[in-house]
């Protein structure tokens, strides 16, 4: 937008400097040049207005909604949403003691052991089943939940 305006001013400045060297018959040339400059300015203004309308159409306006306040005699009830209780925040914190590492053919896998989670975490039944894994080893089969998958789902390792 600014570049077009500067280019128009520069073109007008070059045109005006060229008239200083023109012969006496420059009146007609000056009128033609001024008409051309005015035409360019009008076209530029139309383009600018159209771009502004497009920009305004695509802007998102958000209404800030305040929670209603109800008055009941002398008591005032504010119905604004309260923050989550601590127990709801803790649902996504997994115990660090259950984090295990296993070597597989594909490389090292970090996972949370299922039995450990069942003993130390109250919400095992709410863990995403897409993260459940089964590891087969030489000595035994292991079940658990892949740590990277759980992290993508919003779960975190509880720090002590």
Image: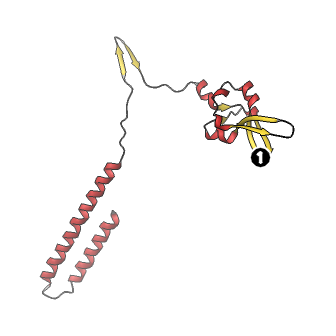
User: Residue at point 62% right, 41% down?
Assistant: 152
Looking at the image, is 132 positioned above or below residue 9? above
User: Residue at point 28% right, 70% down?
Assistant: 8
Which image quadrant for residue 97?
top right
| Structural crowding at the residue carrying mark 1, measured as other residues with C-alpha within 10 Å and reported as few (<14), some (14–19) or many (≥20) | few
Left or right of residue 93: residue 105: right
Left or right of residue 74: residue 126: right
Give the residue number, with chain letter if any, for mark 1.
108
- Viewer-nearest residue: 9 or 125: 125
Residue 147 x, y percent position in the rendering = 69, 39
Which image quadrant for residue 138?
top right
Looking at this rendering, what residue extends furthest in the bottom direction?
23
Looking at the image, is 92 positioned above or below residue 1? above
Residue 90 x, y percent position in the rendering = 63, 28
Which image quadrant for residue 66?
top left
User: Residue at point 75% right, 37% down?
Assistant: 134
- Quadrant assignment for the N terminus: bottom left
- Viewer-nearest residue: 112 or 130: 130
Residue 122 x, y percent position in the rendering = 67, 24
Residue 93 x, y percent position in the rendering = 65, 31
């Amino acid at each position: 937008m600014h570049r077009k305006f500067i280019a128009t001013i520069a073109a007008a400045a070059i045109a005006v400097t060229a008239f200083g060297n023109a012969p006496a018959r420059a009146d007609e040339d000056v009128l033609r040049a001024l008409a051309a400059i005015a035409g360019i300015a009008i076209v530029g203004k139309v383009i600018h207005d159209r771009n502004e309308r497009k920009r305004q159409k695509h802007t998102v306006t958000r209404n800030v909604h305040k929670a209603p306040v109800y008055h009941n005699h002398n008591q005032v009830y504010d119905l604004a949403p309260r923050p989550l209780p601590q127990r709801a925040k803790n649902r996504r914190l997994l115990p660090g003691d259950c984090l295990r590492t296993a070597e597989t053919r594909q490389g090292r896998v970090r996972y949370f052991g299922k039995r450990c989670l069942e003993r130390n975490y109250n919400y095992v039944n709410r863990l995403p089943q897409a993260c459940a894994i089964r590891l087969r080893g030489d000595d035994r089969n292991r079940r658990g939940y892949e740590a990277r998958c759980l992290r993508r789902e919003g779960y975190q390792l509880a720090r002590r």
